[in-house]
Amino acid sequence: QSLTYEVRNFQVLQHPERKQTEVRFRLRFPAELTGLQLYCKSRFDYFREALIESLIDSIQTDAGWTRRYSQIRSASFSSNDYSPFTFSPLRAQEFRVLIQNGDNPPLDFESVSAFGPAHNLMLRFPAGASEQQYYLYYGNANAPAPDYDIHAFPTKIPKQASVLAVGEEEQVADVHLQVDTDYKSTKWIWFVLIPLLAFLGLFAFRMLKPTE
């Protein structure tokens, strides 16, 4: 089962000096891809070598921004084969495909589709959970892994589970662990007692010091 991701900023750049066609596209957000499909508008027969790359980062120089790419795989692109390009799972947001035209007319493209594996999150709720409201938080790299009983019974997970109705995704501020209320209620006492005890100790020391 695969999931198709929304593509934005689709561009086709022709580089006649390099006899090359460059196809750039960007996903809405970083995603794990396992393949992509190019849709060519050219109607003549062709057989070209292609190189698929993902954007690593961009570096600002005196001449402007320089993009750095990492090679994913090389492939052949032919009018006789409309199979998608597949590769090992890779997480990125921006990609490009470099097509070598040689002495042939450059190719033109109308769109691209990007797809990756669909991950399912299986949950077991207690009785009466339909009356409760639950929240799923993500994005904290330091959060501990969850520990539920369900991981010990993989064979008992139903193949056809009910699908949850989820609400809109919301951006939230940093979530901090709640401090114990008893500690919070007594914490201010120590801030008062420590200076007071220090003052009383100093006063008692001066009272006991013998006078000349």
Image (tube, helix red, strand yellow):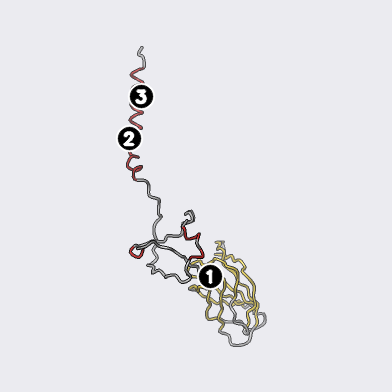
- x and y percent of residue 180 in the render? 36, 46
Counting residues from the N terminus, which is met first, the one under dot 3 or under dot 1?
A: 1
Compare marks 2 and 3 and give the one earlier in the sequence.
2
User: Residue 16: image x %, image y %?
Assistant: 62, 78
Number of the front mark, 3 or 1:
1
Disc 3 target residue: 202
Disc sitting over residue 77 in the figure: none
The answer to whether 139 appears left or right of 107 in the picture is left
Q: What amino acid is at disc 3?
A: Leu
Residue at position x 50%, y 73% in the image: 3
Mark 1 neighbour class, 10 Å CA radius: few under 14, some 14 to 19, many 20 or more: some
The percent position of residue 171, horizontal first and vertical second, equals: 40, 61
**Marks 3 and 1, Cα distance to the nearest angstrom?**
71 Å
The secondary structure type at the circle numbered 2 is: helix
- Rendered image quadrant of residue 74: bottom right
Q: What mark, if any, has residue 192 been given in the picture?
A: 2
Of 123 and 176, nearer the camera is 123
Q: Amino acid at mark 1?
A: Pro
Foreground residue among 159 and 191: 159
> What is the C-alpha distance between the residues marked 2 and 3?
16 Å
Mark 3 lies on a secondary structure that is: helix
- Please tell me which residue is depicted at 45% across the width and 60% down the height of the picture: 138
Residue at label 1?
Answer: 117
Outermost residue, front side: 156
